[in-house]
Image (cartoon, rainbow, N blue to C red):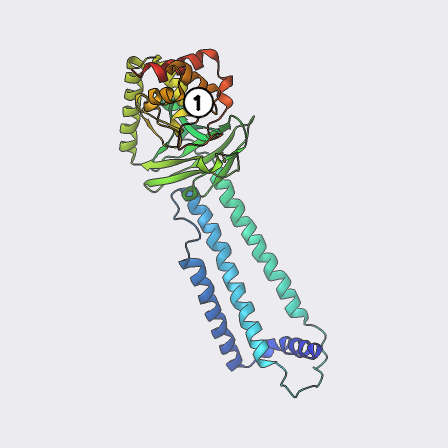
């Protein structure tokens, strides 16, 4: 029975070239309906975030190019299958054989050549988008990205190494992120920027972003890098160029006054920022407001609870973070890599953190 159906199907299919006009109209109608459904699923479900960079727009274009082709093929297949199933199905009392046929050369050439052309087109469009996204424009700003378990830090060589835990970018200016990892493999991902880039210990990777939409977007680590992986997040803020310039000025001013005012001086603050402390901790003298780890403005209280002198407690908490865990926080989230900090840096950091407190 199956054989009979298949043969009838094949026979009917081979005659598609000479289908009557009425049938053709129905085929097209079914195809358009299928295309409409597929398009609705592709278009009205927000599969991708709204692009916020030139690079993301190119990726979006590739997405729609491929999706458009897929919708057209889907519509064609649905139309032909539905038509064949309905038109050539065997009646319950029909046990006769289908007509013997011997393929259809024209159809076979068509269904080989057309996909070959389409796949080539997809490859070319993708390659062009990839090449353009990898291109570093002559005028661009450089930002150094440092990843470590489990924090991001961003520094701006153009502004004397200004280092912050939140990425800020001026609208419309190409930015090259030069990325390094201190420990394991991490991956930089801002969904709205459309690109992901691994940060691999020992090599420098990079990605170019030209933000073209104002807003605040999540920076996500998208490579499982340890227990705190899910917490390894930050934000990318795209600002108007004037606002960005004002922010840079304010940061530089804050850094200057902190290095004069706070104990530990500039060295402590520099160590605090360059080691990514500001990515996880709130600490007023450093102007950081992150909330992944305990608020360092309350260090004296933590030291009292831990029953240790402040400076000793601060040092221990840096080199052996699991020795005392503040209530409401979890062990193994704070990196244990800081025990290898150069002594000078560690001393400055301890002084900065404990000295700023009364
Ligand atoms: Cu870093 Cu996941």
Counting from the top left corner in percent of width and height, residue 48 is at 43, 50
Q: Secondary structure at mark 1?
A: loop
Depth check: give the residue in front, 300 or 125.
Answer: 300
Whether residue 36 is situated above or below residue 207 in the rendered picture: below
Q: Is residue 281 left or right of residue 108?
A: left
Q: Quadrant of residue 306?
A: top left
Whether residue 278 is situated above or below residue 127 in the rendered picture: above
Q: Is residue 6 left or right of residue 289?
A: right
Of all residues, the one furthest to the bottom in this rendering is 93
Whether residue 198 is situated above or below residue 59 in the rendered picture: above
**Residue visible at 31% across and 26% down?**
248
Within-10-Å neighbours for mark 1: few <14, some 14–19, many 20+ = many
Position of the N terminus by quadrant: bottom right
Counting from the top left corner in percent of width and height, residue 69 is at 51, 59
Whether residue 308 is situated above or below residue 67 in the rendered picture: above
According to the picture, the residue beneath numbered tag 1 turns out to be 275
Counting from the top left corner in percent of width and height, residue 30 is at 49, 73
Whether residue 299 can be seen here: yes
Position of the C terminus by quadrant: top left
- Asked if the residue at label 1 sits under 8 Å from ligand 1, the reply is no
**Residue visible at 54% across and 69% down?**
78
Depth check: give the residue in front, 264 or 57.
Answer: 264
């Amino acid at each position: 029975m199956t054989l009979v159906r298949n043969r009838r199907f094949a026979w009917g299919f081979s005659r598609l070239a000479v289908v009557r006009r009425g049938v053709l109209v129905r085929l097209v109608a079914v195809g358009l309906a299928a295309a409409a459904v597929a398009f609705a699923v592709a278009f009205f479900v927000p599969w991708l975030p709204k692009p916020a960079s030139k690079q993301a727009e190119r990726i979006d274009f590739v997405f729609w190019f491929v999706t458009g082709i897929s919708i057209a093929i889907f519509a064609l297949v649905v139309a032909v299958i539905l038509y064949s199933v309905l038109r050539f199905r065997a009646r319950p009392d029909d046990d006769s054989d289908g007509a013997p046929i011997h393929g259809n050369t024209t159809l076979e050439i068509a269904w080989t050549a057309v996909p070959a052309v389409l796949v080539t087109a997809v490859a070319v469009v993708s390659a062009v988008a990839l090449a353009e996204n990898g291109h570093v424009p002559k005028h661009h700003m450089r930002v150094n990205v440092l990843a470590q378990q489990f924090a991001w830090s961003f520094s701006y060589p153009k502004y004397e190494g200004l280092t912050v835990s939140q990425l800020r970018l001026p609208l419309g200016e190409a930015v090259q992120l030069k990325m390094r990892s201190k420990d394991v493999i991490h991956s930089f991902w801002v969904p709205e920027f459309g690109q992901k880039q691994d940060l691999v210990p020992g090599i420098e990777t990079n990605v170019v972003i030209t933000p073209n939409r104002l807003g605040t977007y999540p920076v996500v680590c998208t490579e499982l890098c340890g227990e705190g992986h899910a917490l390894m997040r930050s934000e990318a803020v795209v600002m108007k160029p004037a606002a960005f310039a004002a922010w840079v000025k304010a940061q530089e001013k804050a850094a200057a006054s902190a290095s004069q005012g706070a104990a530990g001086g500039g060295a402590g603050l520099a160590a605090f920022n360059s080691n990514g402390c500001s990515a996880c901790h709130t600490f007023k003298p450093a102007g950081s407001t992150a909330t992944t780890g305990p608020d360092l403005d309350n260090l004296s209280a933590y030291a009292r609870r831990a029953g240790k002198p402040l400076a000793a407690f601060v040092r221990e908490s840096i080199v052996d973070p699991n020795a005392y865990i503040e209530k409401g926080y979890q062990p193994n989230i704070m990196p244990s890599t800081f025990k290898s900090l150069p002594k000078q840096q560690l001393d400055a950091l301890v002084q900065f953190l404990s000295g700023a407190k009364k």
